[in-house]
């Protein structure tokens, strides 16, 4: 399998394609050219063109997981502020005074 390349620093320079080959292993891959770090989640490298946008979009799902490596959390949390605010607002709205969620269906 060919190596993964960094979409952040991939570009044409002097008529040639220039890119960084991602290095490392789970839980993070790193581009030696631009130093961007990419998470590996459940054995799958996450290498989107805009990692920050992907992390913001996926923050609610990622925040619900309890098995992510601390290095991956370090990438997720800075992008998850809106999801955290929404989660906290929902918890305050739908939780009883002990902090447990109320079963609204029952």
Image (cartoon, helix red, strand yellow):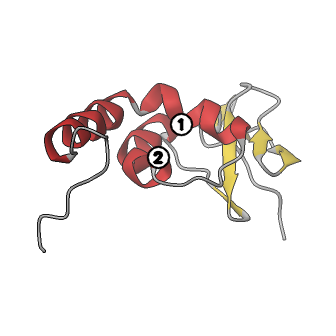
Q: Is residue 9 visible?
A: yes
Instruction: Identify the residue under disc 1.
Output: 76
Badge 1 element: helix
CA separation, marks 1 and 2?
8 Å
Q: Report the residue that reaches farthest toward the bottom.
A: 106
Which quarter of the figure is the N terminus placed in?
bottom right
Residue 63 — which label?
Answer: 2
User: Do the CB atoms of the residues marked 1 and 2 lie less than 8 Å apart?
Assistant: yes
Q: From the viewer's perspective, is 93 left or right of 100?
A: left
Earlier sequence position, callout 1 versus callout 2 = 2
Residue appearing at x 14%, y 40% in the figure:
93
Which quarter of the figure is the C terminus placed in?
bottom left
**Can you tell which of label 1 and label 2 is closer to the viewer?**
2
- Residue 18 figure quarter: top right
Residue 9 — which label?
Answer: none
Residue appearing at x 46%, y 53% in the figure:
64
Provide residue 51's location: percent of width, then percent of height.
Answer: 52, 40
């Amino acid at each position: 399998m060919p190596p993964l390349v960094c979409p952040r620093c991939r570009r044409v320079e002097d008529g040639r394609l220039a890119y960084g080959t991602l290095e490392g292993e789970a839980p993070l891959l790193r581009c030696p050219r631009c130093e961007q770090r990419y998470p590996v989640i459940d054995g799958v490298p996450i290498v989107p063109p805009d990692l920050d946008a992907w992390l913001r979009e996926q923050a609610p799902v990622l925040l619900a997981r309890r098995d992510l490596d601390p290095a991956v959390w370090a990438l997720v949390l800075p992008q998850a502020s809106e999801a955290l605010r929404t989660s906290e607002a929902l918890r305050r709205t739908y939780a009883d005074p002990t902090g447990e969620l109320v079963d609204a269906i029952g």
